[in-house]
Amino acid sequence: MNFASDNWAGAAPAVMSALARHNSGFEPSYGNDPISGSVNQTFNEIFERDVAVYFVATGTAANALSLAAYAKPGGVIFCHTDSHIQIDECNCPEFMTSGNKLVSVPGTNGKFTAEALSGTMTAFPYGVVHHGQVAAVSISQASESGTIYTPAEIAAIGEVAKSQGAALHMDGARFANALVSLGCTPAEMTWKAGVDVLSFGATKNGCWCAEAVVFFNPDDGRNFEFFRKRSGQLLSKSRFAAAQFEGYFDNGSWLSTARHANGMAARLDEGIRALGGKVAWPVEANEVFPILKRFQSETLKAAGARFHEYTATDWPETLAPAEDEVCFRLVASFATSEEDVETFLKAYADVI
Amino acid sequence: MNFASDNWAGAAPAVMSALARHNSGFEPSYGNDPISGSVNQTFNEIFERDVAVYFVATGTAANALSLAAYAKPGGVIFCHTDSHIQIDECNCPEFMTSGNKLVSVPGTNGKFTAEALSGTMTAFPYGVVHHGQVAAVSISQASESGTIYTPAEIAAIGEVAKSQGAALHMDGARFANALVSLGCTPAEMTWKAGVDVLSFGATKNGCWCAEAVVFFNPDDGRNFEFFRKRSGQLLSKSRFAAAQFEGYFDNGSWLSTARHANGMAARLDEGIRALGGKVAWPVEANEVFPILKRFQSETLKAAGARFHEYTATDWPETLAPAEDEVCFRLVASFATSEEDVETFLKAYADVI
Amino acid sequence: MNFASDNWAGAAPAVMSALARHNSGFEPSYGNDPISGSVNQTFNEIFERDVAVYFVATGTAANALSLAAYAKPGGVIFCHTDSHIQIDECNCPEFMTSGNKLVSVPGTNGKFTAEALSGTMTAFPYGVVHHGQVAAVSISQASESGTIYTPAEIAAIGEVAKSQGAALHMDGARFANALVSLGCTPAEMTWKAGVDVLSFGATKNGCWCAEAVVFFNPDDGRNFEFFRKRSGQLLSKSRFAAAQFEGYFDNGSWLSTARHANGMAARLDEGIRALGGKVAWPVEANEVFPILKRFQSETLKAAGARFHEYTATDWPETLAPAEDEVCFRLVASFATSEEDVETFLKAYADVI
Amino acid sequence: MNFASDNWAGAAPAVMSALARHNSGFEPSYGNDPISGSVNQTFNEIFERDVAVYFVATGTAANALSLAAYAKPGGVIFCHTDSHIQIDECNCPEFMTSGNKLVSVPGTNGKFTAEALSGTMTAFPYGVVHHGQVAAVSISQASESGTIYTPAEIAAIGEVAKSQGAALHMDGARFANALVSLGCTPAEMTWKAGVDVLSFGATKNGCWCAEAVVFFNPDDGRNFEFFRKRSGQLLSKSRFAAAQFEGYFDNGSWLSTARHANGMAARLDEGIRALGGKVAWPVEANEVFPILKRFQSETLKAAGARFHEYTATDWPETLAPAEDEVCFRLVASFATSEEDVETFLKAYADVI
């Protein structure tokens, strides 16, 4: 019953098999291997346009370097109060952008609206040197609360961003989970809605170590090779990353693993709600955030369930944990079994 | 006949097998997995003392972050004119150290002496704010010229470094190759000779993506977790790196692969010399640097040999390439076959 | 009727006279002049202990470099929501600290309490690498709202800071105004209350360009000369800064100019309140923040009054400007005349 | 007999008088004062085109921020081996450019040629990510050796720079000294010869604290206000800098002070040579570099002469100091008197 994180899983079979398939023989290093070339082509197909793709080692690096490409001296980057780049990346975005400031935009359900963004941005009028200058807007898809922006919501945010000269970045650490949840195309969820650059995460959804930065306007990435190398993110045996992506995309493996993970989360959500349990946010991807009395949560742990507590700034009004309550996060991945879900729900039924 | 680089090879069998062995089930992320714990213990045993070990994604990151741990405002880092950190890392050390300066120390054979270091350091007297302050000294073992510092040479350099308050860093991208060449212990080649921090490279010698920063005085690394995370180098599925190291060390696999690579390089060297060929530097690890007329080099390429040209600043006096000559680099790895070596030598015999 | 800012004034007579007095002849540059030596001694006397004093060119530099001296990789710096370092320094603190994050602590009256600080800090538990590590706490004395921390309030904040391993910085852009307002000693307002480092501002209160960073534990500044020089803040003709400070301190000139400025602000405050006007915060130093209908404010401008509008995040509950209202800032300096104050109050009486 | 440095002098009378003239009353801060506006216009006239001018506090800041405006990730900046930015700025250029690398170009007489630049640049071919990317070229006018580039030499360097996509920066800490020495126009010495950005130094030649960054293509400075503010270089009482420049330019004061300084240096040079003394480099501006036996130099000091020793990397072949010799630097400024020069020459005659 392990729901601690989707990066507690190993690599999916399709990924391991691609790694084995491409292990023998010699291939050029530093991105010049033919597997990288072919995977780049797959990215073009997935996004229905020519994109510039750069592999990096971690999701944090993907986010920070995406933002570095649009950073400015005194630059300001807008993101959700509870976003990963604001809370969980140890200032990597600030460091990689040479000191751009991350300004929080509030919003319930882990998302902010175009209106909220616009409101926050008014504190940074054009040309006022003391306050810095607008550089980028970043949204997470899926969000830290496991919720999803619709293409229309993204487009509205994108318009506000563009109107202020800001680039729009999407942190897609759980891109596939969001995609299969929406049922739209990758293009509709990104550049067609105004996204300029995407952190395309594959690690959580089935790889060992496969993250990519995708520029929808390839020219925006003209300096990116240098940003990547100067931060020690250019993998020498680059075929190793390329092979993972090849396996990831093979036969739609990535969509299957994401669907499975989302399905397991939905089952958890349904089960909990059916038992009268509280869940903080709508379950739209592969994460469920139940709220329990602390002693109930401890009983679940004692029964063998693994999960982390979760603290947000923006709680839904009616659901914020009370003094004696705790919110915890259940994350499903390709490796989550139906059995584990059922076992958990039984244990949950016992404590509630 | 591929001698382009040791990072053109895939992963060694022991490494692939360890990855497969540890692929199933759930393990804590971000370095808290038990495999990491056990590998850390192996590092302690290898170095005969408690060391602090941190995995990172690339050799460049290992070098730059090692140096960041000892960086100072206005800091100066001394390294060989032709060193990787000076020439081949796109200013990653400068960036990660927030602008420390890399000052070149000259020296033949890809190495500098304690005397040369001392001489270069005189331009940076203590407390002269304009010139900056001495922060660290970095040596490469094996060097970019495929040569090796003896423990005595390292110790002499270490003494100069210490006398000026500088930490001593070793870029061990080819640590194993140097180690088996010297036949000494890892401890003798490092902390017993005054090395404070080591970039322990495993990728070139048989892993996919496995590099570690090793602090011999663990307290020196007290901030390192933060340096690592803020540069996007904390791998989420950390067991993936740990498993590679486990396989790497398993049954002395790392020493075997290094011995094989060195042996192939020695065979190339002997063969070339036996044919009256010129080789720029003594072959002490897994790299050979022949010098040929340019047309001869082109003929070799046409015969199917793959290698890169190499340009140094410090040529051995009697061997610097003439106008119509070119120096090229042959790198052997665990994947280099005896057949390829023999084929190459036959082709070489034909052109010379 | 110019109340736009205390840096719209020139230099006070004592300062101009010291500059003239020290203009002739040759003096060592870069801080080695005897005037600097003598001024440093004056600082020791003022603070009743040996302090380490470093002149820099601007208040922003003083703040950012003070913080740089205590920065950490992934470091977090706590400051008021409306503080100058958070709002008005174009990310200079983030840049100079290589990406430390400024986290806002809320609080009314431009100040935060020890409790509020403690609450905000709980989101940054020790050793959680994702969130970064606590580095420093910064308070402004006087605050952006023209209010003042009592020594007891500072001490309480200092205790929270120390308990979390954070240094305590004071932004003293208006240090003298706060000092004469409290009527305590400089020591009581700083190191005796737990302050580690002070941005000692003299420009606003009568100099041309004279700011200093003061370390109360001189060893904390051991690297500061290098921080200063690497950011281009080491003045070559350093006697020019030293001379200003000499004039500033001469015969208590700095206390007189501050008292005058505070007195003018108090007169404005009393006058406005006597006329039934609203003032956002208690006037404790040299700034007054009246709230008027926008048309009234425009009428005042038309009458020749110069001031800036002011926007805060933390408004006093009962005083936040309504839709049709505006808060504006009146700043008094040594150059503010009683006449101007009276003229303003007459104009104010006309519009209210 | 003080020849230690031109920044051991105070401020010239025209500068002091302008400061006094503009001291009273209120003026907008942060560069919005009318004096700044009028001085900017003077810069346009001096350079015969519309330029963008930004005041900063120090020459080091002017250099580093000029380069920051053209920096790139992994960027490389070419400068003379003995240049101030390479040797004497405590890595400020590296810091302000977020880790660009300063690569030395050799050359006698403190200058490098277009050919030498071109040769050094070949190690940085376009698009090789490991080596970084060409960003800028910097020359010093006058050089650290007191020599001067002719407009033709600058133009040749500018052509090489442009052909590689590099901006051309001029460190004009002693701009006026070079200008009056050449007898050309400011335009001919700068943008007409390909200079993109200039550190216009006025401090050494008669101001207290007045340095400017001048962009000849104003659009190149579009982000400069943010670069300046984020490094704490935006002076609050900006009229103070503007007034100095006003006095500096008044009635050609700056040219007179430079002519005087150069004349004093020429007199020193002639006197020393007439006595059979050695001088390391041609005296083309306001610096003289005699070479003496160490005991002779000590005798001069004992006689009351103040100067610094000087160490270069690129010595003129026939003049490099022998073991028992020392090179020292004599700097003349507006404050250097003929009497001091004569007294020095007499003392020199006694020791030689």
Image (cartoon, coloured by chain):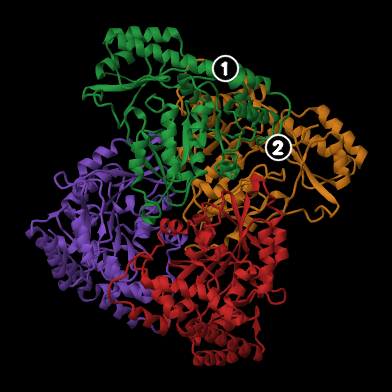
Chain colours: A red, B purple, C orange, D green
User: For this view, does D37 lie left or right of residue B123?
Assistant: right
Using the rendered view, name the quadrant where residue A225 is placed. bottom left
Where residue C156 sits in the image (x, y, percent)? Answer: 61, 51
**Left or right position of B103 against B256:** right
Determine which residue is flagged by label 2: C181
Point out the frontmost of discs 1 and 2. Answer: 1
In which image quadrant can residue B334 be found? bottom left
Q: Is residue A205 visible?
A: yes
Q: Residue B264's x, y, as percent?
A: 15, 67
For the residues labelled 1 and 2, the Cα–Cα distance comes to 45 Å
On what subunit does the disc labeled 1 rest?
D
**Amino acid found under the numbered disc labelled 1:** Ser
Q: Which residue is mark 1?
A: D253
Q: Nearer the viewer, residue B126 or A130?
A: A130
Q: Position of residue C224 (x, y in %)?
A: 46, 40
Q: Give, as a three-letter code, the residue at label 2.
A: Ser
Residue plotted at (56% across, 42% down): D220
Residue B342 sits above or below residue A254 on the image = above
Which of the two residues, C101 or D18, is positioned nearer the viewer here?
D18
